[in-house]
Image (cartoon, rainbow, N blue to C red):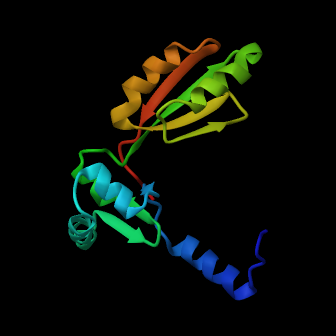
C-alpha cells in the first residue's frame, strides 16, 4: 500500500533532492549478529569497529542497514567514477541477452532507445571482467566502453 505524501513532505523531499549531491553507496541489509558471525568476532567487537568506521566517515548506519560511503570506497581502492558500457544487441536475441546481463557483476543496467540497446554502469575495477563476460553472451553485437575521469556536477 502506497502512502500519500503531504504537500510539505513533497516539498521537503524535493529540497533534499535538489540540494543533495549524488554519491555511490553500497548498502548491506544484514543483521549485526549475522555480520559479526561472518567476521568471526563478537557483536560487541563489531559495534566498536562500526562506530570507528562511522566516526571516520567510511560508513553510515541506521536501523537495519549499513552503507559504505564514497570515502569508504576510496579507502578500499575502489574508484567512485563509474565506467559505462554501451551495448548493441541482435533484435532476435535481446530477451536471452538481457537475462544474462542481469546476472553480471554490474552496478546498473538500462535498456535504452537510440543508437544502442543497453547502457551498463560498472566500477572501473570490474570493467575488464564485465567486458569478458559480455563477450560470451550470444546476441551481443558490439560493446563500447567509457571510463569517467571527473565528476562535473
> What residue appears at the point 66 percent right and 19 percent down from the top-left corner?
89
Which residue extends farthest bottom?
8
> What residue appears at the point 37 percent right and 63 percent down from the top-left corner?
32
Q: Is residue 5 above or below residue 92?
A: below
Depth check: 40 or 24 in front?
40
Residue 89 is left or right of residue 107, and the answer is right
The image quadrant that residue 25 belongs to is bottom left
> Residue 124, position in %: x, y?
36, 36
Depth check: 50 or 119 in front?
50
> Residue 43, position in %: x, y?
28, 65
> Residue 38, position in %: x, y?
31, 49
Q: Is residue 144 above or below residue 43?
A: above
Q: Quadrant of the C terminus?
A: bottom left
Q: Can residue 49 be seen in the rendering of this structure? A: yes
> What residue appears at the point 38 percent right and 46 percent down from the top-left corner?
81
Q: Is residue 36 above or below residue 144?
A: below
Q: Quadrant of the N terminus?
A: bottom right
Depth check: 39 or 132 in front?
39
> Residue 40, position in %: x, y?
23, 51
Depth check: 50 or 38 in front?
38
> What residue appears at the point 51 percent right and 30 percent down from the top-left corner?
104
Q: Can residue 68 be seen in the rendering of this structure? A: no
Residue 18 is left or right of residue 89, and the answer is left
The image quadrant that residue 4 belongs to is bottom right
Q: Is residue 120 above or below residue 62?
A: above
Amino acid at each position: 500500500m502506497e502512502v500519500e505524501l503531504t504537500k510539505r513532505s513533497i516539498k521537503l523531499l524535493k529540497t533534499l533532492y535538489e540540494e543533495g549531491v549524488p554519491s555511490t553507496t553500497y548498502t548491506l541489509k544484514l543483521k549485526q549478529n549475522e555480520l559479526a558471525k561472518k567476521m568471526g568476532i563478537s557483536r560487541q567487537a563489531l559495534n566498536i569497529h562500526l562506530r570507528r568506521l562511522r566516526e571516520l566517515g567510511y560508513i553510515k548506519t541506521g536501523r537495519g542497514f549499513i552503507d559504505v560511503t564514497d570515502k569508504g570506497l576510496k579507502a578500499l581502492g575502489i574508484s567512485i567514477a563509474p565506467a559505462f558500457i554501451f551495448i548493441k544487441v541482435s533484435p532476435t536475441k535481446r530477451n536471452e541477452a538481457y537475462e544474462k546481463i542481469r546476472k553480471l557483476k554490474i552496478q546498473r543496467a538500462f535498456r535504452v532507445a537510440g543508437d544502442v540497446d543497453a547502457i551498463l554502469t560498472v566500477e572501473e575495477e570490474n570493467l575488464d571482467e564485465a567486458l569478458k563476460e559480455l563477450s560470451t553472451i550470444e546476441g551481443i553485437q558490439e560493446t563500447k566502453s567509457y571510463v569517467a575521469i571527473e565528476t562535473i556536477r
